[in-house]
Image: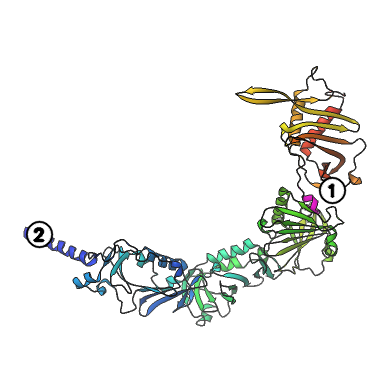
Amino acid sequence: MKQGSTWLIISLAVVLGMFVFWIDRTPMKTVVSKGEFLYPDWDPGKIVTVDFYYTPDKWISVAKVNGHWNLTAPIKYPANEAAIEKIIASVKNLTTDDYISKEELEKNKRTIEEYGIKTDTQFQRLTLREKNSVTEFHLGNKTVGEDEVFFKITGKDEVYLASADFFDQIPKDENGWRDSRVFQPYRHHVEKINFKGPAPYGFELARNTVNPNRWDILSPTPSRADEGKVQELFNDFSKWHVEKYVGDDLSKKMIEYGLDRPQAQISFEYKDENNSAQKNTLIQFGNIDITHTNLAYIGLITDMNTNVVLARGEFLRSLMRPWQDFRCMKIWDVRTNDIQSVLFSAFPEESQRNKAFLLEKNGDTNTWTATGLSANSLSGEQTYQTDPQVVDWILQELAQIEVLDVTKEVVNDFSEYGLDKPFQRIVTTGPKGDQQMVDFGVVVTNEDPPEEKIYMRCKENGGSSLQTSVYEVSAKDALKFPTEAFQLYPRDIMTFSTNDFRQMKFRLGDRERVVSREKKRVKNVNGKKVEEFSYKIKGYDDTKEPIPEAVILLMDEFAFRLGELRADSWLNMGDEVPAEFEVKEAARSLLVEYKVNGKNVEKEILFSDLKVDRMPVGIVKMNGKMWIFRFPPATYEYYADLLAILMGREGLGKK
């Protein structure tokens, strides 16, 4: 090749390259400021319909109804909401960075059709509608590098350029606009679920009418449903995807699909937001596809349309399970934070006010009060402040205790279980007025393994109120709750720091020993004043023989424990000590003196020889009443050791 020809070819290539660049990248006119957003105030939430025409004969229309997107024409189907929201949101990113003005088009004798834009026909047209306005885009070709796309806006003369993503995010066909899940329960406020499968499989679930956050089993046996298990069912459906869209008319080929006599079916009844009309989606399981044996024909029937899809048939196995799997095995199906009040009744319903009390939350606070409901009980018709730790424990127990077993599914005569006149009834009330009532009946003793169990029955309002099953719960769980309002009173008996402790007087009959803690001196330690204390035993001369260090440590630890003394539980409260708790003549008592806000305070504790649940019993006077309580065993050990040392003949000797 001659050198002149080579340069001629190179020159032509350069000219051709510049020509192509000019065609695709005509210099922009600064009709508007460069870099501005085309829709700076764009609000995706205002768009209510989206239309896209692939060609005049191929198009799709979607609309937002009750907060969710649905295909409305030419097919009716739940829409791919994520894809639609992405398309709408991308409009806000369109800018005036690149555009070709009308004057530039006329100057270079170009038409918009040369950029693939056709405004005289419905071709690649994206229409977004608000209630009172329309935004319409006519999409054209991509640039040579395919990183941008030409488009025109109805009502504007310019041709703009946008990132190719603006075009690529639009589904390639009508099916891309559909929700890929067979059914999405979270799109609706599902109120009832009914599954009919091959015998013996089947169940019916419904929301509680008083508290919609809870679920009930309606059939085959009424009982509470486990909310977590229902949510698991919803999650399973959200993961069940369509493999192929077969048709949008279920009336065709029903026999071929096996949908004239489906193997099983499940229906969801629901009400959409702002729409009180009851709606229904029925999902039917048909034949296995002969070319894809892991797929089955699924019929989808709604109030608006019918569709047939192919999806994994093994999903049916997850539904064919015993209905008991949905049963709630908790005695009370409650959340701790939702409980507003708890009614404790220790006698059958007709006489429950003879010994009953109400634990009630104080408004929106985390404080509670306990009110006695009978003048004949120890608590009387009085309101007591409550111990926060005790209330927290009660609420946790109510929310967590589970039944041991189901005694019998359907019971007609509850008398043999002692549930016609239960020995105790506990009723919880939730934030929506929903109540759950539990009755406890006869105690049953197992020999192997040895265990005491109690029959119980659950009732409620707004759901399966007439539950017919009898359950078993451990006697330990059933009998752990308080029976009187005073038992919830704060259990702190003494509260002081060791430095505020003054003395403790041990008494055994007519004998007594006094142990005091006195300031010994003030030392300067690293520039700080540190007080030193010493223990003294009245009548004991420690100048001859110092108190043993082990005894001092014992006194110090006991004084510390007395400063945080807390009843393990209240056993009784009244003007006098009942006979069964009476202390003997050789009474054991402890008188403690300490300071509170600079003032001396004395508190005396009497000890009974009686033990309750193997725990020592103490008696203290508070608020003009005698309070009997279970004394903490660990603290009592320190008391007993000191009592033996002070009153015995060994150690310090009898003084």
Check the image and report above or below for 438 versus 122. above
Query: 328 or 315, which is in the foreground?
Result: 328
Q: Residue at x 26, y 71 (%)?
A: 115
Q: Is residue 370 visible?
A: yes
Left or right: 126, with 651 as reference point:
left
Q: Residue at x 75, y 51 (%)?
A: 385
- Quadrant of the frame with the N terminus: bottom left
Q: How is the image coloured?
A: rainbow
Dividing the picture into quadrants, the one containing residue 597 is top right
Sequence order check: which comes first, mark 1 or mark 2? 2
Q: Residue at x 85, y 39 (%)?
A: 607
- Residue denoted by label 1: 572
Tag 1: amino acid: Asn
Helix, strand or loop at disc 2? helix
Dividing the picture into quadrants, the one containing residue 190 is bottom right
Left or right: 269, with 179 as reference point:
right
- Residues shaded magenta: 478-493
Query: 197 or 547, which is in the foreground?
Result: 547
- Residue denoted by label 2: 7
